[in-house]
Amino acid sequence: MSTVSLSLEEIFDLAKKTLLANGCDDETALILSELIKNAERDGSVSHGLFRLPAYVSGLKSGKINGKGRPEVKKISSSVIKVLGNNCLAPVVLSKGIPELIKTAKENGVAVLAITNSHHMAAMWPETEKLAENGLVAFACTSYKPAVAPAGASKALFGTNPISFAWPRPEKTPVVYDMATASMAMGEVQVAKREGHEVPLGTGLTKDGKETTKPDEIIDGGVLLPFGGYKGSAIAMMVELLAGALVGDNFSYETAAKDNNDGGPPSGGEFILAICPDKTAGTEWQKHSEEFFKKMKSMGEVRLPGERRHKNRIDTGPRNINEELVNKIKSLS
């Protein structure tokens, strides 16, 4: 694979130039470009520049409103709703997360229910932001069907990622972001691009047979949930939380109304924030740090998020797939 070296600033500038050229206003382009740059910085390459052509597809078709503004509504003392108005999710989150932080700290617990936004980024930025503000966080979102329920060979669930973050004042938070599929579709697509196989159990061919070839999963096949029935149950939970509970669509309903332009479809997101000072008093931090210390003493154990935070320390250039960079440049 041929790569080109780009500084973090060059990654940001490339993304912003492309977004501005394809219908975004400055605020939307700034927010999304920062997110893309940070994904590349932290090693989340399947959610960095790799996603940019799909964002452009959605902008060009008019499905995504690159100049829209979400509406924040306070439904009750602990429930905030944000109407996405076909904006990109990072823009919606930039308006909703500050309100969620304030509300959770006031009431001890708060929910952010997001509808009609286009989410295709990593989910750790929203939960990490909450943890950096002293809150325990959980978030999930659905997508178009790509994952078969346990016992089936046809897709019903999205890859349905979940993200959890735990605050560690004066330290980087514990935070994970994972698909409830055996592998995120973006990772399968990267494997196809780079000529890698995927582990057995990742997905099935269009004929319902297990395969290690990413192209057979992408082209008419289906992903499998992680952990069989256990992962399938968690994927179902995400459908309910990010669909019915927030007042948005299930993955199959999302697919039915999507224009299939290659861009992220419209959907919902559920975010829960809990203030540990309210639920546990003043000793929660000391108690949890003792737990993390014991956990790390048991061998080569890495707390979730540590690798990403280690990558973040390196502010040098990143090696980006040359074909992808050329494709992005052609879009602007």
Image (spheres, rainbow, N blue to C red):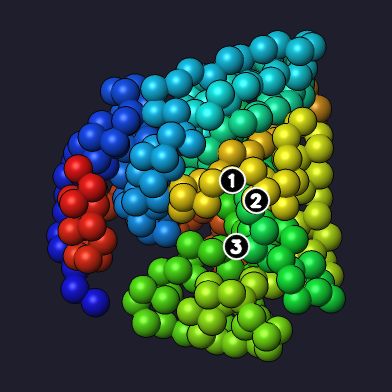
Mark 2 burial class by Cα count in 10 Å: few <14, some 14-19, many 20+: some
The dot on residue 21 is none
Coordinates of residue 126 in the picture (x, y in percent): 54, 36
Residue 11 located left or right of residue 230: left
> Looking at the image, is mark 3 or mark 1 earlier in the sequence?
1
Secondary element at tag 3: helix
| Mark 3 lies on residue | 296
* Residue 277 visible in rendering: no
| Mark 1 lies on residue | 258
Q: Residue at x 67, y 48 (%)?
A: 256
| Mark 2 lies on residue | 255
Task: Report which quarter residue 223 is drawn in.
Answer: bottom right
Q: Residue at x 65, y 30 (%)?
A: 115
| 37 vs 214, nearest the viewer | 214
**Labels 2, 3: front one:** 2
Q: Quadrant of the N terminus?
A: bottom left
Residue 56 located left or right of residue 236: left
**Labels 3, 1: front one:** 1
Residue 170 located left or right of residue 111: left
Cα separation between marks 1 and 2: 5 Å
Q: Residue at x 79, y 11 (%)?
A: 76
| 56 vs 7, nearest the viewer | 56
